Image: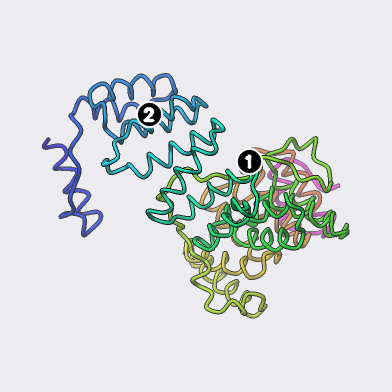
Amino acid sequence: MQMYAVFERIAARLVPGTGGATHRPYLPLGAFEQYVKGLVAPTPAAQERFLEQARQQVTADDRVLLALWDLYASQGADAKALAAAQAVARNAPLDRQARFSSALSMIALRRYNDAFAVLQALHGETPSPVLSNAMGVIQLRRGSTPQTGLPSYFFNRAADEAPDNADYLFNLGYAYARSRDVDAALYWLREEVRFAPADGEAHLLMSQMLTIAGKKVEAQREFDLAKQLGTGQDPDALALTDAVPAGLERLVGRLDLRPHDRVNTAIANPAQREQLELAAFHVARGRRLFEQEDDRASANELRRAIYLRPYDDEPHLLLGRIYQRGGRLSEAIDEFRIAVWSRDSAEARVRLGEALLDSGDRPGAREQALLAIALVADHPEAKALLARIGGKAP
């Protein structure tokens, strides 16, 4: 087991304070080899073969069993996934995750009562927003009453437990949308897009709620942005309507998720959220940090600005440039699309065109360059982009 000792020493140097931590029993090397091969195998069939070989050597190891659960759940083999999760012993280190995974499999198998009982027991032991959210999903799917607990109750509890998680905010807004509570749905969906401004499904739901409220101009703007950002629905079948589709609720698959950026902690007073001065301060800091190529700190400042003013174009433009510089082209394109939607400008069109060109979409890039020139005939960057693509201004 000398190999394990070497890796423990490396881990202790990389993460100070872990050297004296208690560790679980080592996997036998043969089982460990099959386990690792199963994690990195290129096809599901190969993954299953290696992981099942590991399981034969360590029949009750929770790491191997949960790796099998992940595999089977991703393939839609929910009965096999459930069996793997339920094989984890109650005293195993990953018992809590295993029981949650079994509840997710029960949800997929429509065994809602069994799943709810498991989640309720887990939440009684240690509360978690992931559990509250899953309970809300069950109530949304199986139907509920105020006596059994409405979906909005559980989603609201999840949002209280993790107030900056966009998925919980989306689910809360979606639950109100399903019950046609327009004001509550719009409130929570607007809160959600502060944290996830490129969430096309949230903008689509907002367009539907605004349609019900009779605000046709605002509804059309949200609908247009949703189409630009993309949703889980067929884009050709999308139409501006007041019909709220079923099946948009979001499940979170792991209990140990922690937010990496807690935007709320950076905003001391909720009353400041709508102040233009505070948003401008964060944009100015973000711009300076961007120019200094401190992209991580700059992105954090810009996200704070977007939280305060989600429909200002400048922070989206700068954040898009950070993503583009880091090679995160799909995220950059989303930010530039929001910037165009917020305020149609030649600069935003050029930035979007450059990102599209970097991603290989030459026709899309050309379209954006021409639209920029239509806005500002002598725009030098638009002309330069068009020259890169291979063409000239009309």
Q: Nearer the viewer, residue 372 or 17?
A: 17
Vertical arrangement, residue 57 with respect to residue 106, above or below? above
What secondary structure characterizes most of the magenta part? Answer: helix
* Tag shown at residue 141: 1
Bounds of the magenta span?
A: 372-394
Residue 96 figure quarter: top left
**Amino acid type of the residue that numbered disc 2 sits on in the rendered structure:** Ala
**Amino acid type of the residue that numbered disc 1 sits on in the rendered structure:** Arg
Q: Is residue 265 left or right of residue 142?
A: left
Q: CA distance from mark 2 to mark 1?
A: 25 Å
Q: Residue at x 43, y 19 (%)?
A: 45
Within 10 Å of disc 1 (Cα), the crowding (few <14, some 14-19, many 20+) is some
Mark 2 or mark 1, whichever is nearer to me: 1
375 is within the stretch colored magenta:
yes
Vertical arrangement, residue 145 with respect to residue 273, above or below? above
Q: Position of residue 28 (x, y in %)?
A: 18, 29
Vertical arrangement, residue 306 with respect to residue 117, above or below? below
Vertical arrangement, residue 140 with respect to residue 258, above or below? above
Q: Quadrant of the N terminus?
A: top left
Q: Position of residue 278 (x, y in %)?
A: 61, 78
